[in-house]
Image (cartoon, rainbow, N blue to C red):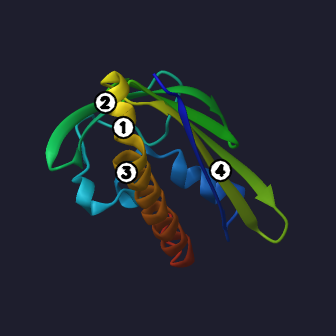
Amino acid sequence: MAIHTFERTQVVATTLAECWSFFSNPRNLSRITPPALDFRVLSVLPAKIHAGLLIQYRVRPLFGFAITWLTEIAHVATPHYFVDDQRTGPYRLWHHEHFFAELEGSNVEIRDRVTYALPFGPFGDLLHRPVVRPQLEAIFAYREKAVVEIFEAGSFKAS
């Protein structure tokens, strides 16, 4: 089983408090997920994440097949860091670290590091380069654009 790492960093013109308020509200996840994934939350969500929070949702990552995904918020260090780990879902391993750092000039650096492994042994690894990695790139590119639009519009509050 190959272990892969995906990292993405962006800078957003906002305060650390506003950025944390947006990202620590699990109700905002659908706002930064591409519509093509048909993302649907199945859990009742609180207004803020906390360690131990389980979030169940349905997503259609490949060829329109629906998959139920359960993640746990494993660690929270307000307002700088949180981790979500897949408990059940499409990956053999999914460990997503979210970092937030205040920069000069009312900017915040948002950094994501995802450590993941694919199911199905060598067959899953064959799909990494042509299918999975490009999909992750597209998902995070969409997210980056959505985050910029949300903060530029001042609509970072939960919808």
Name the foreground residue: 140 vs 27: 140
Local secondary structure at mark 2: helix
Q: Is residue 85 above or below residue 138?
A: above
Task: Report the residue marked by disc 4.
Answer: 111
Task: Report the residue marked by disc 2.
Answer: 123
Q: Image quadrant of residue 68?
A: top left
Horizontal placement of 107 versus 51: left or right?
Answer: right
Position of residue 60 measured from the top left corner of the image (x, y, whole percent): 21, 46
Q: Image quadrant of residue 45?
A: top left
Q: CA distance from mark 4 to mark 3?
A: 24 Å
Position of residue 104 measured from the top left corner of the image (x, y, whole percent): 85, 66
Q: CA distance from mark 1 to mark 2?
A: 5 Å
Name the foreground residue: 7 vs 73: 7
Q: From this viewpoint, is residue 159 visible?
A: no
Q: Amino acid at mark 2?
A: Phe
Q: Amino acid at mark 4?
A: Arg
Q: Image quadrant of residue 88?
A: top left
Q: Nearer the viewer, mark 1 or mark 4?
A: 1
Q: Is residue 72 above or below residue 36?
A: above
Q: Amino acid at mark 3?
A: Pro
Local secondary structure at mark 3: helix
Q: Callout 2: few (<14), some (14-19), or many (20+) C-alpha neighbours within 10 Å?
A: few
Q: Nearer the viewer, mark 4 or mark 3?
A: 3
Horizontal placement of 83 versus 9: left or right?
Answer: left
